[in-house]
Amino acid sequence: MMIFFWIIVIIALFYLLGDHKKYDGNDTKKLGIPAEEVLKMRYVNGEIDEKTYTKMKKTIV
């Protein structure tokens, strides 16, 4: 029974200390994609309109 306790403790530590995040599409810094490129992609995909694109572009540049 004691072995199961230690296995659970080790698994819990591994889970808590490890980086288990999966890429969700919003973490562009890790991918090295410049903010302007992300903005262009969002505009092309129709996520934002021209007015928002222009405003955001002025903000990041």
Image (tube, rainbow, N blue to C red):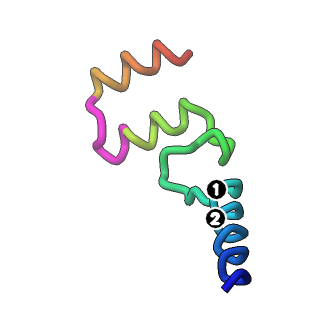
Q: Secondary structure at mark 2?
A: helix
x and y percent of residue 43 in the render?
A: 36, 38
Circle 1 packing at 10 Å, graded few (<14), some (14-19), many (20+), is few
Magenta stretch: dominant SS? loop
Q: Secondary structure at mark 1?
A: helix
Q: Is residue 54 magenta?
A: no
Q: Amino acid at mark 1?
A: Leu
Q: Looking at the image, which is closer to me, 15 or 53? A: 15
Circle 2 residue: 12
Quarter in which the N terminus is drawn: bottom right
> In the rendered view, does 29 fall on the left or right side of 3?
left
Q: Looking at the image, which is closer to me, 40 or 32? A: 32
Q: Residue at x 67, y 70 (%)?
A: 11
Distance between the Cα atoms at labels 2 and 1? 6 Å
Circle 2 packing at 10 Å, graded few (<14), some (14-19), many (20+), is few
Is residue 25 depicted above or below 9 in this figure? above
Q: Residue at x 66, y 82 (%)?
A: 4
Q: Residue at x 56, y 44 (%)?
A: 27
Is residue 30 depicted above or below 35 in this figure? below
Q: Amino acid at mark 2?
A: Ala
Give, as a single range, the part of the protein colored magenta: 43-49
Quarter in which the C terminus is drawn: top right
Q: Is residue 47 magenta?
A: yes
Is residue 50 depicted above or below 41 in this figure? above
Residue 46's image quarter?
top left
Residue 16's mark? Answer: 1
x and y percent of residue 16 in the render?
A: 64, 56
> Mark 2 touching mark 1, by CB under 8 A?
yes
